[in-house]
Amino acid sequence: MTLSAAARALALRCEPRANELARRMARDSFKALPGYAELPDDVKDLEIAATARYGIRLFLRHAGDPHRAHTNLRLFRERAAQRAEEGMPLHLLLGTHSLGAYELWRALREAAQPGEEAALVELVDLLLESHHRVVGAVAETYIDERTALEADARAHHRSLVRGLLDGVLKPGHILLDELRLEGPALVLALDLGASAGGSVGERRRRRRAQTVLDHAFGTEVAALLDTRPGRAVVPTECEPPDDLAQRLSKALGTPVRVAHVPAAGPVDIPEAARTATEILRVTRACGLPPGLHRLEDVLLEFHLSRPDPSSHKIAALLDPVADRPELLETLRTHLAHQQDRRATATKLGLHPNTVDNRLAKIGEQTGIDLPSPRGAALAIAALLLRDTRDTRDTPGDGPYSRR
């Protein structure tokens, strides 16, 4: 913008008042802004006053000398980053810039003499245009800094949660004070029905799941939801709401499976997390539907799935039908429905005779007498141990587990 000689003269006339104006802004004018009075005196009297003085001189010198370099916003950006790090609210920071521009306008108006109305209008145009750039740079820098700080805080928090769940951070560790987990807790393992990833959609799903957990327990739940399964620790001795899985399913638009295990104290949290994860695996391997699960729901199956010297032989019983996934799925569904052939047929969309034929084929090829109690127990143990073996050999889900 090219200014007239009169406008440049008016700006130069105000320049000696820069120190006075900056002090007046920092000590008096900004007091009207909510929260400003609570700021430390050194911040107000030194840093904010210095920034105001820099801005006043920069504007007046630029207005007085058309050949001067374009406005340098570096100091404004540095101060914005500093205020963000200190936690000053953005509205207060932007308020100081807006009120400062107004005070500078008042100073120009007071200095204007009769006949300099047109020059004053020119300077106001330049002031508004400059203010737009300054506020934009300040807001952008502040938001960038806050985003970076919050990302660092989230990463630190996640690291603490992971260390606690994995047993890396031992009870009594000073960092665990940040998690507020001194007493009994509830540990959750969550199958949210989708692979973890870094896409926008996955991040949105995790935020929704976190919101459901926080609302369900009435507190901020420490959670790791970008792993599979997800894990969470609730800092309270309680039972989860009966409809927790349904709430998560509604929020995420997919069936959700949740296992929960109480922990008497921080020292018990890692084992509770391992148990909850195993409960999820067992419920999938047994063909149980998504929902809320406790150890008591799968006590026998959990016990049968524990590896021992005989495990590989039991798991090998199903090797003859390992390449027939439809047979394994029929067996899994049949066992999950208490060996009810009609319920199995309805679940799989088959004729009951087809179910009978498939079960007979399994019996012929494996030698397992499925109708007998011992045969059913062997089949359950074989399915669970194959799932344990395949999960151990290949990270992730074994081919015989079911989501």
Image (tube, helix red, strand yellow):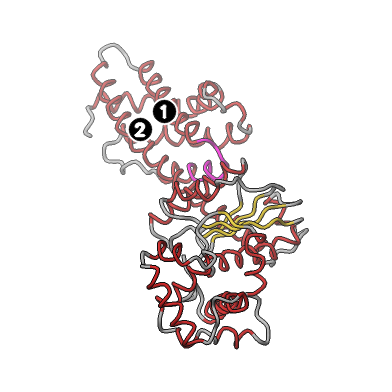
> In percent of the image, x 42 and y 61: which residue is there?
198
Q: Is residue 226 above or below residue 1?
A: below
Which residue corresponds to mark 2? 131
Left or right, residue 265 beside residue 105: right
Asked if residue 176 is among those painted magenta in the image, a careful observer would answer no
Q: Quadrant of residue 273?
A: bottom right
Residue 61: x, y in percent?
35, 34
Residue 350: x, y in percent?
36, 67
Asked if residue 88 is among those painted magenta in the image, a careful observer would answer yes
Q: SS at mark 2?
A: helix
Q: Quadrant of residue 103?
A: top left
> In percent of the image, x 65 and y 80: which residue is there?
307
Query: What's the magenta region?
Result: 80-89
Q: Amino acid at mark 1?
A: Ser
Q: SS at mark 1?
A: helix
Q: Amino acid at mark 2?
A: His
Which residue corresponds to mark 1? 98
- In front here: 215 or 106? 215
Residue 125: x, y in percent?
27, 27
Q: Quarter of the image containing the N terminus?
A: top left
